[in-house]
Image (cartoon, rainbow, N blue to C red):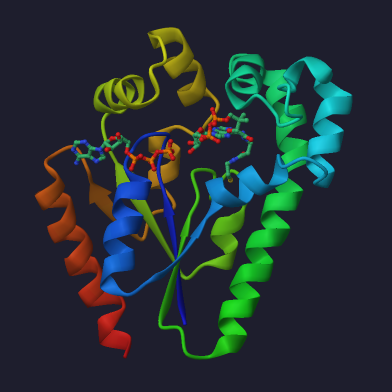
Amino acid sequence: MIKIGLTGGIASGKSTISKILKGLGAKIIDADIEAKAALKPNAEPWQLLIKEFGKEILKNDQSIDRRKLGNMVFGDKQKLNKLNSIVHPFVIERIKGKIAYMEQKGDIKAVVLDAPLLIETNLHNLVDEVWVVDVDTKTQISRLIKRDKYNEEQAKNRLKAQLSQEERLKYATAVIDNTGGRRHTREQVTKLWNNRVEELN
Ligand SMILES: CC(C)(COP(=O)(O)OP(=O)(O)OC[C@H]1O[C@@H](n2cnc3c(N)ncnc32)[C@H](O)[C@@H]1O)[C@@H](O)C(=O)NCCC(=O)NCCS
Ligand SMILES: Nc1ncnc2c1ncn2[C@@H]1O[C@H](COP(=O)(O)OP(=O)(O)OP(=O)(O)O)[C@@H](O)[C@H]1O
């Protein structure tokens, strides 16, 4: 089973590319989904986050108000470090568990780990390939604002919480340019899949 880490900054196009890879036959592990499980009521991180950030981060139904927590931590390095120290160990363990399960199944050709913080969390050490989605910052910010309805400051604070693209690219075994149209992206992804995955089988 080949393990591919798919990473890139916020709103660079990882989910869009994951969907293409799923269509080509890859199994997907989505780190954002695993991180959402950490914030479910009664999960250990949920309890620790309330201790750290107070009940004001809770909605009436006891779920965490993600937008509120996001606005608290992005732009405040200390708070972000605290959040990361609570959530990341949980997410990393779940991802390791999923990879181990898929590996022992024995019939999976390729798994793609879609993780915005692949390198920041050292998850790149678990995979055979690191595919980096590349977009210029201007495109990234405008797609982020359009998708999530943030203002420019909120968008920039989210970008600042992540590794620079220059740093991320140092780890790349392949780069996918997602500044152009979706068709151009699909062509690159299909080519990569055929070269790196199909040829192994
Ligand atoms: C702070 C939270 C509650 C905000 O929730 P929200 O629904 O607004 O954002 P969502 O979870 O959909 O994340 C959107 C994007 O933000 C970026 N992002 C999320 N968390 C972080 C972080 N800790 N540091 C840097 N960027 C981050 C990623 O690019 C992610 O794809 C949430 O992002 C969270 O729980 N973050 C911690 C978990 C984490 O680090 N996830 C990344 C997986 S390795
Ligand atoms: N080639 C493209 N052309 C135009 N829009 C695109 C393209 N690729 C992605 N988008 C749009 O840009 C936004 C961000 O893409 P996507 O959600 O795939 O990014 P992401 O990296 O998974 O984001 P996040 O890190 O927040 O999870 C989405 O609204 C998506 O529809």
Task: Using the rendered image of the protein, determine whether residue 121 is visible from the camera's viewpoint.
Answer: no
**What is the x, y in percent for residue 89?**
75, 50
In this rendering, the answer to whether 97 lies above or below 162 is below
Residue at (71, 36) in percent of width and height: 84
In this rendering, the answer to whether 71 lies above or below 13 is above
Q: Where does the C terminus fall, quadrant-wise?
A: bottom left
- Residue 174 falls in which quadrant of the image? bottom left
**What is the x, y in percent for residue 109?**
40, 83
**What is the x, y in percent for residue 166?**
38, 36
Marks counted in the figure total 0
Residue at (56, 79) in percent of width and height: 102
Which one is in front, 113 or 32?
A: 32
In this rendering, the answer to whether 91 lies above or below 142 is below
Ligand 1: quadrant of the figure: top right
Is residue 141 rendered to the left or right of residue 72? Answer: left
Which one is in front, 17 or 50?
A: 50
Residue at (45, 8) in percent of width and height: 153
Is residue 118 rendered to the left or right of residue 190? Answer: right
**What is the x, y in percent for residue 53?**
80, 20
Is residue 154 rendered to the left or right of residue 57? Answer: left
Residue at (42, 34) in percent of width and height: 10
Is residue 188 rendered to the left or right of residue 43? Answer: left
